[in-house]
């Protein structure tokens, strides 16, 4: 058994000091009351002029980011492992790890701006909430078994199976647009209880010459069927989606190794020529549906269509359309990844081992 606990004493995340204070949406009869910023350059205290200078009367958006420090965040994990060497040539192990972590900033991105711009939020842009870390696998199982047999004094054959099974990762359900008008597309969605809690607009998912019009009513029906088939969204009705709260499905990969040893003593020391065959994702060789990776069809599931018209304390409710997925409104959470990563592959090896 092993347990680990880490506490973040000082972490880095970015803040934009050039944003004015937001106001709660506060639209009568609409449940989502998140803070929103003024539209366009009005959200900036200072703006950029055409000459590149900073001025309160400029016409360009200006998003300076200051690296700030925070103290919130933690990680923990517990691992249990059983390992056994038997007398008849068999050996094996099995291990399970349960882990969790919450942070203010995941550490993703390659620029200072990213410490502020790509962290999914609900409230104020400069006050990210403590939420699930995107780099943690909450549940993971690994196991292996090996059989090795020596014979004729100079030969040995071994066969090994290795299994890894875990969720494939986490993701965030965000809007496919800038709902709170802070200039970034990183707003976590609100999951309505029923169709009265969200307003859709008609949208053409085709082209002008080949239209595919889906009405607001059709999109609403598709959206609530989507929620029913999505375990995470079904559990968040009437609540905001969480950063990295949704999980990809479990995936299991079974690998097979065959090794043939030919050994003899040379100068009183054992020398071995070993030939190996590794079949990675061996389960996929047995069944094409095993070992495949999944991808999220549309984490930005809802696209705002009238965010410029929203007024805090006004009467205009946000309106949306469903995100496009391969030329159609999105209807399901996941699809198989059709790539080499989802198929079996082999590796051959030849090595000379001496002591």
Image: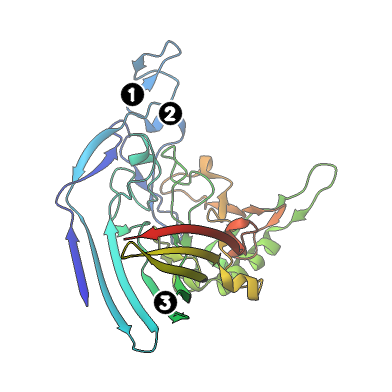
Pointer 3: residues within 10 angstroms few (<14), some, or many (20+)?
Answer: some
Q: Residue at x 35, y 61 (%)?
A: 136
Instruction: Name the residue carrying label 1.
Output: 46
Q: Which one is earlier in the sequence, the residue at label 3 or at label 2? A: 2
Crowd tier of the residue under label 1, counting other residues whose Cα lies within 10 Å: few below 14, some 14–19, many 20 or above: many
In the rendering, at what x and y percent does residue 103 appear? 27, 55
Left-right relation of 62 to 237:
left
- Tell me which residue sits at (59%, 46%) in the image: 305
Q: CA distance from mark 1 to mark 3?
A: 60 Å
Q: Quadrant of residue 2?
A: bottom left
Q: Element at badge 1?
A: loop
Q: Are marks 3 and 2 in contact (CB under 8 Å)?
A: no
Report how far apart the C-alphas of labels 2 and 1 lie in the structure: 9 Å
Please name whichever residue, 176 or 108, is drawn nearer the observer in this view of the structure. 108
Mark 3 element type: strand
Which residue is under mark 2? 41
Relative vertical location of residue 152 with respect to residue 212 in this rendering, above or below? below
Proximity of marks 2 and 1: CB atoms separated by less than 8 Å: no
| Residue beneath disc 3 | 144
């Amino acid at each position: 058994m092993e347990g680990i606990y880490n506490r973040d004493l000082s972490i880095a995340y970015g803040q934009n000091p050039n944003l004015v204070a937001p106001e709660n949406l506060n639209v009568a009869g609409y449940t989502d009351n998140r803070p929103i910023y003024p539209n366009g350059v009005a959200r900036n205290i200072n703006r950029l002029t055409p000459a590149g200078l900073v001025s309160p009367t400029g016409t360009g958006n200006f998003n300076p980011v200051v690296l700030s420090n925070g103290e919130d965040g933690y990680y923990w994990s517990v691992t249990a492992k059983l390992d056994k060497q038997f007398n008849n040539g068999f050996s094996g192990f099995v291990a399970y790890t349960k882990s969790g972590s919450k942070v203010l900033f995941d550490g993703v991105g390659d620029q200072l701006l990213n410490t502020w711009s790509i962290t999914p939020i609900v409230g104020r842009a400069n006050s990210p909430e403590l939420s699930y870390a995107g780099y943690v696998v909450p549940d993971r199982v690994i196991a292996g078994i090996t059989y090795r047999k020596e014979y004729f004094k100079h030969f040995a054959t071994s066969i090994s199976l290795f299994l890894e099974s875990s969720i494939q990762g986490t993701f965030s359900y965000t809007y496919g647009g800038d709902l709170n008008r802070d200039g970034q597309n990183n707003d976590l969605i609100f999951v309505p209880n029923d169709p009265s809690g969200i307003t859709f607009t008609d949208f053409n998912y085709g082209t002008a010459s080949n239209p595919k019009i889906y009405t607001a009513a059709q999109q609403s029906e598709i959206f609530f069927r989507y929620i029913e088939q999505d375990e995470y969204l079904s559990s968040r009705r009437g609540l905001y989606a969480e950063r990295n709260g949704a999980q990809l499905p479990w995936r299991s990969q079974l690998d097979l190794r065959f090794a043939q040893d030919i050994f003899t003593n040379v100068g009183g020391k054992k020398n071995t020529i070993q030939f190996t065959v590794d079949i990675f994702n061996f389960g996929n060789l047995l069944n094409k549906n095993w070992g495949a990776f999944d991808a999220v069809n549309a984490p930005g599931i809802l696209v705002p269509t009238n965010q410029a018209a929203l007024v805090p304390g006004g009467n205009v409710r946000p309106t949306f359309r469903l995100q496009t997925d391969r030329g159609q409104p999105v209807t399901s959470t996941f699809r198989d990844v059709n790539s080499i990563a989802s198929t079996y592959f082999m590796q051959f090896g030849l090595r000379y081992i001496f002591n």
